[in-house]
Amino acid sequence: MIYTITLNPAIDETLEVELLQPGATHRVLSHCRYAGGKGINVARALRVFAEECTALTVAGGATGQELAGLLRGEELPCTIYAAPQPTRVNLKITSRADGLTTELNAAGRLGETAPAERLKSELLERLLPGDIVVLCGSLPQDLPAGWYRDFAIACRAKGAAIYLDTAGEPLILGVAAQPDCIKPNRQELEPLYGYRLENTEAIAEAAWQLLHRGIGQVVVSLGAEGALLATRETVLLAAAPAVPTANTTGAGDTMMAALVYARLHSLSPEETLQFAVAAATAKVVRPGTLPPVMSDIQALLPRVTVQTV
């Protein structure tokens, strides 16, 4: 069984304008609100891949009720733990002319740690060896930065595999739990070392060092450039095909879902990276939270070139 964990979900309010220009007045071309959160996006993509998954999240207040209603409307399998504080609202502004998305993400709070601790204890009770736990996104301000690390260690003791996708101090501390896979982007990877990673060789070296700290697989997403995958046997780089971009939100989460899928189906490192980049690319052509379409992924696969670094 796959479980995704989203402790800092949001109502994502998405506006589309023709071309976003700072300081200018814009006419909104479209507007929608949807249930946001990295683990929720991972669960959406896994459903496209026909994998059984449950999304675990925490929500509160009127916006939390809205989030729960939106997830029910999608019929996405999920368990929601009630929190005292209202769920945050994030603003995403998509520029139609260039396909770029500007994100204004609010800080989140639970109001107390009890909902997260209930989620943790209940999941640990039902975890089985071979289950996969995907820890995604930022942490609420009232949870300690080491929460993912501590939970990952407890899950690994139950025989579960850990996939970690976060940033900042939660990532810095989380690598100590030796996850089976982490998926930072370049900007999220750099704070682990305290200096800029200027080129592919520097990124590959940084990923290689993380492998020697006990992490099973390191995947660095490079946006429109593709991604780098490092295991103890090889380091690979894949270029992403050029496609028209509708919305980049959730592309990295789709890549994480693809990495989980690859583990379940015993794909080779080359096949894993090719599928992950094709899936993320297929997501950016879809508006809002709409997950990729499997036929689009299959069509993109031959266009993803993989080479050894």
Image (cartoon, grey):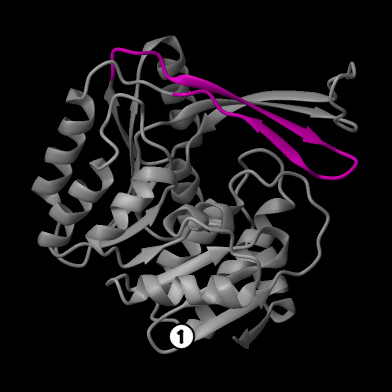
- Could you tell me which secondary element the residue under label 1 belongs to? loop
- The residue beneath circle 1 is 268
Residue 237 seen from this side: yes
The amino acid type of the residue labelled 1 equals Ser
Extent of the magenta region: 83-107
Q: Nearer the viewer, residue 24 or 169?
A: 169
Q: Nearer the viewer, residue 25 or 265?
A: 25
Q: Position of residue 229 (x, y in %)?
A: 51, 75
Find residue 50 and report its image quarter: bottom left
Location of residue 59 with respect to 261 vertically, above or below: above
Apparent side of residue 241 relative to residue 46 in the rendered image (left or right)? right
Apparent side of residue 201 relative to residue 259 in the rendered image (left or right)? right
Q: Residue at 74% across / 78% down in the picture?
A: 303
Quadrant in which the C terminus appears: bottom right
Q: Position of residue 291 (x, y in %)?
A: 60, 49
Quadrant in which the N terminus appears: bottom left
Queried whether the magenta region covers residue 297, the answer comes back as no
